[in-house]
Amino acid sequence: MPTLIVATGNPGKLAEMQTYLEPLGCQLTLKPTEIEVEETGSTFYENACLKASQVAKAVNQWAIADDSGLAVDALDGAPGLYSARYGNTDRERIAKLLQALEGVSQRQAQFICVVSIAAPDGSIQLSTKGICSGEITHSPRGDQGFGYDPIFWLPEHKKTFAEMTKVEKQKVSHRGKAFNKLIHQWPGLKFDSF
């Protein structure tokens, strides 16, 4: 089983990916800090592929990357690709989004995640996508999770992501769905071919 280089410098993201990939028994390690990848794609798919490919080529090893964000229907998909840069802190991002939706009754939104794996030559060998549909609340609820979790409401669960346990969230989240698909497609990867 190869070690996958995670195309991030964020140890929290590495830990989260390790949890999702635990059933496969693969090892993950952070990318070298000197490797920077500019996210110039126009979709989550393009950015995930770009990050995985560039890191894989730079270290000549298998790499994994994800790109994700929140797309709000009433805002024509915003914040979308710019979800992490919609403000300087989670609190700012939430406040800005709630302000943008002030007076808006249609609050449907989707969290989207794309996970890509690249071979050492940079070729993308696998990409999966997970979508979790919900609604944006009028105010934050719950204290679990991060990012937009306190305002992302799942009607069928009657909770925001921030009100769910980590296990509950992993089962229904966009990232959980993308990694679940990846796990099912994993056996098709040809690690020995590179």
Image: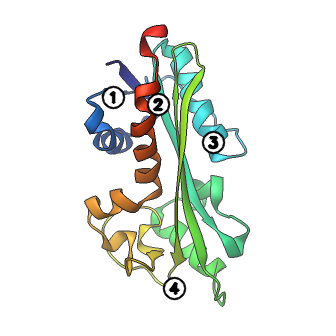
Indicate the secondary structure of the residue bearing disc 2: strand
* Residue at image point 63% right, 86% down: 102
Tell me, yes or no, whether the two marked residues, 1 and 2, touch with CB atoms within 8 Å.
yes
- Kindly tell me whether residue 33 is visible in this rendering: no
Mark 4 vs mark 3, CA separation in Å: 30 Å
**Amino acid bearing label 4:** His
- Determine which residue is flagged by label 1: 28
Choose top left, top right, bottom left or bottom right for residue 173: bottom left
Mark 3 vs mark 2, CA separation in Å: 13 Å
Query: Upstream in the sequence, badge 3 or badge 2?
Result: 3
- Determine which residue is flagged by label 2: 64
Query: Upstream in the sequence, badge 1 or badge 3?
Result: 1
Mark 1 vs mark 4, CA separation in Å: 38 Å
Indicate the secondary structure of the residue bearing disc 4: loop
Q: Position of residue 85 (x, y in %)?
A: 59, 55
* Residue at image point 47% right, 47% down: 178
Q: Which sits in the foreground, 93 or 76? A: 76
Query: Upstream in the sequence, badge 4 or badge 3?
Result: 3
